[in-house]
Amino acid sequence: MKNIHLIAAARPNFMKIAPLYHALSKESWCCVSIVHTGQHYDPNMSDAFFRDLAMPKPHFHLEIGSGSHAEQTGGVMIAYEKVALADKPDWIVVVGDVNSTAACAMVGAKLWIPVVHLEAGLRSRDRRMPEEINRLVTDSIADVLWTPSRDGDENLKREGVPAERIECIGNIMIDSYEMLRGVIEADATRGGLGLAPQSYGVVTLHRPSNVDTREALAPLVESLLAVSQRVPLVFAVHPRTRKKLQEFGLMERLTGSGAIRAVDPLGYIQFMNLVTGARVVVTDSGGVQEETTYLGIPCLTLRENTERPVTVTEGSNQLVTPGSLVGALDAALAKHGRSGHVPDLWDGRAASRAVASLKRRSGVKA
Ligand code: UD1
Ligand code: UDP
């Protein structure tokens, strides 16, 4: 019986481990445990996702919480090493690009426990992003690299990763969406806010480069206000961003006109209910760029680069600056119907490809 640890830490991890957890739970050759590092801990940044995605309480909880990059990465390493030594997993699956991802990958590599990276190969080529450092570290030491799209394979090959370690399994976040599509459609969040489909925009922002300084955040608030003159906005405010809006005295300015509704972070079902009815989405989130591409909803991404270029070349995403946001919005509003198309292997079956890969690599007969 192979013992598999799935590492989850922060909001964007939960919708990536859930389909894999459910698929592995049905297999007789393995047992699967969820290890929550505690990087995100507010009920609406963590518990809500376990509930929405029908996952059990984590089997191990490291309770690391917030801190500097070194505190968080080091804290996770120290705590997870103890768990890994005691529970002796045969595989450690890390997902995405958060500090806990790199920390647990390093623990596994040094204990000679095979590490799988789910969502490998993405590159923004911007080393000012903490996530880019986490991606580079994780991909350089992981034993198996599951990519969400072919550009990931190319990036890894260019960096010298042997081809046999790389497998394009597709985008597992789409599995979560498809698993809950009916529940998302039936959810009452949009109606509860009095919003008719296609009559509003959704906003999320949390990248340090956008929110951590007044110089970056104040012009963004002004751009969002200009957008809200054309289409009312619902802004699901990340805790990092709420802290900064309050610290810089910008919350009143943001919400004063009434055209921008600032709400707390939403659960997955509630948030996707809002997104599926949106005319446009304004974001700097990685996951939201992908979900809007899948749904064909125009997405304006407030970033200089993206590690998910297929969302721009194939999907409905466009990179914008605070200065170009309103022009891009007008162009998006002028178009009707679905934008872009869905990349290859974003089909709701990534988890089954991941299970087949682990089974084969564990030497279990099909
Ligand atoms: C982290 C990830 C980022 C990911 C994001 C998803 C890293 C380096 N960053 O960024 O890649 O896109 O999660 O949302 O791993 N806080 C709370 N409650 C919580 C969690 C955080 O109040 O449950 C506040 C704390 O003040 C904390 C701040 O948010 O200091 C930032 O949290 P942290 O996990 O360090 O980074 P994120 O910005 O959430
Ligand atoms: N999300 C959510 N509620 C929100 C905002 C986002 O459920 O209020 C979901 C979103 O649908 C996507 C994921 O969180 O699946 C993205 O997480 P986040 O933007 O925090 O991180 P990133 O993807 O940028 O690392």
Image (cartoon, helix red, strand yellow):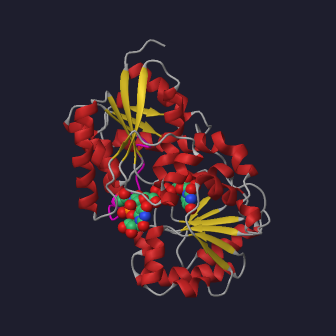
| Residue 324 x, y percent position in the rendering | 58, 76
Image quarter hosting the N terminus: top left
Q: Is residue 199 left or right of residue 172?
A: right
In front of the other: 261 or 61: 61
Q: Nearer the viewer, residue 292 or 351?
A: 351
- Height in image: 164 above or below 278? above
In front: 133, or 85?
Answer: 85
| Residue 70, quarter of picture | bottom left
Q: How many marks?
A: 0
* Image coords of residue 55 (percent x, y): 52, 40
For residue 348, above or below residue 50: above
Is there any visible trace of residue 297 in the rendered image?
no
Picture quarter containing residue 138? top left
| Farthest residue, direction top | 365
Would you place residue 231 above or below residue 87 in this image? below
Is 131 placed left or right of 109 in the picture?
Answer: right
The image shows residue 243 at horizontal and vertical percentages of 44, 76
Q: For this rendering, which residue is in front, 314 or 274?
A: 274
Which portion, as a residue range, is magenta? 118-130
Secondary structure mainly formed by the magenta segment: loop
Magenta stretch: residue 104 in it?
no
Residue at 68% in and 51% down: 295
- The single residue placed furthest to the left in the displayed view is 110
Q: Residue sitting at 44 percent across and 85 percent down?
A: 248
Q: Which residue is drawn at 52% across and 59% down?
A: 44
Residue 200 vertical placement versus 178 (above, below)? below
Residue at 24% of width from left, 37% of height from top?
109
* Residue 127 colored in magenta in the image: yes
- Expressed as whole percent of the image width and height from the top left, the position of residue 113 reads 26, 31
**Residue 335 can be seen, yes or no:** yes
Q: Quadrant of residue 259?
A: bottom right
